[in-house]
Amino acid sequence: MIQRLKQKIERPLQWAALSATVGRLSDVRDFLFGTEEAEFLEFSAHRAIKSHIRHINHEAEFIKCIKQLTQGYPTTKLLVFCNARRECERLAGVLQQERSLRLEVFTHYSSLSAEVRVEIEHKFSQAKSHAICISTSTLELGIDIGNINAVILWGVPSGVESFLQRIGRSNRRENQTNVICLVTDQTSNHIEDTLSFLALIDTAQKGQLPLRSPYELYGAVGQQCLSMIASDKGRFTRVSDLYKLFDHQKYLDRPKLEAILDELSSKEYLQKHGFKNQYGAADNLYRLEDYRLIYGNFGIGSRQVEVCYGSKSLGEVPVDNILKIRSGTLVRFVGQIWKVCKVSSQAILVEPTQSKGKTVNFSYSGKGLGTDSFLYNQIWQLIHREDIQADVLSKSLNQQIDSWLAGIRQICHINEIPFIQSIEGTRYYTFGGYLVNKAIGLFTQQSVFQASPVSLLTHSRIDWASIPENPQAYQPLFNFLFESSEQSIYQDLLPAKFQIHEFMQAWLKDATVNDVLNRLANSTAIQVFSFWN
């Protein structure tokens, strides 16, 4: 997009980039402009973080928490971040049913129309008494909703960047961030969630951020090519003109660009000129425009569309499904077959049918890339330190965490990998992140294994000294590490080899992956008889 702007103005462009969540400023320059000369201004803008962590065992405890934050004050504005839309609505319902709480309650998430979201932002910003807005990541950045007295995190955010964006909304007119971290009543492991919050607070206070070199984003290449052709009303555009958009990206050469364009043509988003080396719009590109999906390269799972029968909502599916179905298509949903009546960016309208024709299954996003090595590696380091900020914990949590840490420190050290032997197999507590654990399971040729961010369950023992420390050494496994979930629409349109290559950027460009592999390869496995208990 910046390269297109530079071509339009036909003169040098002065640019400035600002970020609070990038660990290495030169990466921003390299990603946006290549090796163009730039001046880097880095300084500490420290804000004290006043934090508190407590475990909510029941909805009544959430109500009590809100009362403590609002009663005795003339006005209080609270922003609650949840990790799911259904939790936003659940908490809103809990608060609205509590008559003793006199406050305005709002919800804000991506399924709401842009008009409704703007209206909610305005009402919350202008509220004169107690008000609380319960939101997903839609309010993490870029929207002014006035001064917030405190941010409440309902559940652990996906990573340190999300944590910093969320808590940065709090008390912005003063030099202190107020954040209340709530381990929810829905958690499967309150010890793990508490340690995650402690690690996030610790890294935020120290200004530690993940170091990830700029990714090679082929999906964005396809999106920009489609966008440029669409902006020219679909007219045929020379490949050489498209290539000029990316001449600052050294990883992209002309053959790679033409392979991407050929794939878009085979999928009827573009059409190739009969004899000139040019591409123009095809039917599916116009559909992208009609559904307003041409303007961004966001993960499939980041936006949903409702499936409705009459006025009844049957559920939601990822938005990319509107590109795969048309009126008259038979789809399988909620255990039965439906005929699609109408498709729009707002909803897929269906009706029951007895037709026996070919049915289409909706596609769904999965668990994502598993780029969580930084957070879980930080947790492992924190477990073996003596300077944990216990004062941020509620009294009951403090006692539980203190007791748990004392027990763990007695049975293992930082350079050991605790494991439990059971009828299920051997569970190693690596604290390496999902993708690292999956790679190790594949490399050690486990016939069956289960990987999670914290642990790896295998049927046979692992020789940890045998695992490679260099992330590149796992390249033969990249096809098996690849997961199509959470790709953007445009990543999904790439040739298969480019999809895999882009997915593996989260592995190859993340410095923490190398650190974790090094730690595990040089650690000793030690059997323990319990861990979280």
Image (tube, grey):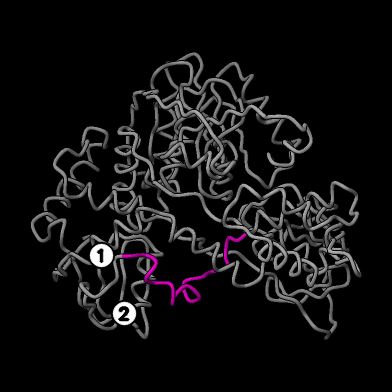
| Picture quadrant where residue 182 is located | top left
Residue 51's label in the rendered image is: none
| Picture quadrant where residue 139 is located | top right
Amino acid carrying mark 2 in the image: Thr
Q: Is residue 467 above or below residue 41?
A: below
Q: Residues within 10 Å of mark 2 (few under 14, many from 20)?
A: some
Q: Position of residue 299 (x, y in %)?
A: 61, 55
Q: Is residue 173 above or below residue 335?
A: above
**Residue drawn at 39 percent across, 46 percent down:** 211
Q: Earlier in the sequence, mark 2 or mark 1?
A: 1
Say what secondary structure mark 1 lies in: strand
The answer to whether residue 197 is left or right of residue 308 is left
Magenta range? 470-487
The answer to whether residue 358 is left or right of residue 482 is right
What secondary structure is the magenta-colored segment mainly? helix
Query: Which residue is identified by label 1?
Result: 429
